[in-house]
Amino acid sequence: MTGVGFFQFVGWLWLIIRRRLGKATGRDERMDYEYRVLVICTGSVASLKVPLLCQQLLAHEILVRVVATDSAANFLECETEMPEDVRLFRDKDEWASWNKRGDPVLHIDLMKWADMMVVAPASANSLAKLANGLCDNLATCVARAWPVGKKPAIFAPAMNTNMWNHPITKKQVETLKSWGYTEIPPVAKQLMCGDKGEGAMAEVDTIIEKIVAHKIERIMSEYYH
């Protein structure tokens, strides 16, 4: 089930859940259920799709914050459509909020704030960093602190076909999956560089499906177990 059909189904299911929760708990069925997603975007041209991803998450009543690597910011700065309700964090923000012992540590605060981490796009460079535990920027520090297995983590690789087909890439993907990450595999299409093949980030609708499914699972778990 994909596209419009999926979202119609989700809307119908969500309405039923809210009505049943209202009857079971005596709460207003119109109440909002807060679900927070931290989107980490890295140095791939697919970062151009992040504003659209955020717009659709907000449409599903999901709170969103974005962490962008400096490389990703080069693409985001080409866009003027990032929703106003979405706060964007960069490496410089880590140090702007910390001056002395006892001050907030941004990458820890972001980890605690979010119910789910979505690395989309996950570039070849950042994929390698995550798989090897490196934490040399705000994005990878959040990922290193993320309680994998306790809170969902999704990654959507995006890179040139030759980079995707490199032997090390498969090992890195399998490493993240073995830790508890969920992969949203890339798709085959004509890439921005002109090459044709696998490596393009999955469609935004596909990523949204995964996130919304986790949101519904979270709600069902909290109220029915």
Image (cartoon, rainbow, N blue to C red):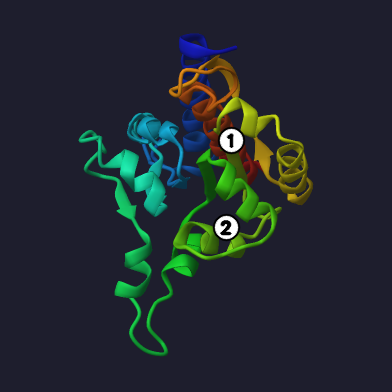
Camera-nearest residue between 123 and 179: 123
Name the element at disc 2: helix
Which tag, 2 or 1, sits closer to the chain's start? 2
Return the x and y of residue 91 as percentages of the image width and height: 38, 62
Which of pointers 2 and 1 indicates the residue nearer the eye? 1
Q: Is residue 211 visible?
A: yes
Camera-nearest residue between 113 and 46: 46
Residue found at x 32% / y 44%: 74
**201 in relation to 102, above or below:** above
149 vs 10, left or right, is right
Tell how many labels.
2
Name the element at disc 1: strand
Camera-nearest residue between 222 and 184: 184
Q: Which disc, if any, is residue 19? A: none
Tell me the crowding category of disc 2: few under 14, some 14 to 19, or many 20 or more residues within 10 angstroms, Cα based: many
The extreme bottom residue here reads 101
Q: Is residue 185 visible?
A: no
Q: Which disc, if any, is residue 143? A: 2
Return the x and y of residue 6 as percentages of the image width and height: 53, 15
Q: Which disc, if any, is residue 157? A: 1
Tell me the crowding category of disc 1: few under 14, some 14 to 19, or many 20 or more residues within 10 angstroms, Cα based: many
162 vs 141, left or right, is right
Return the x and y of residue 148 as percentages of the image width and height: 67, 55
Q: Quadrant of the N terminus?
A: top right
**Label 1 sits on what residue type?**
Pro
**Label 2 sits on what residue type?**
Ala
The extreme top residue here reads 5
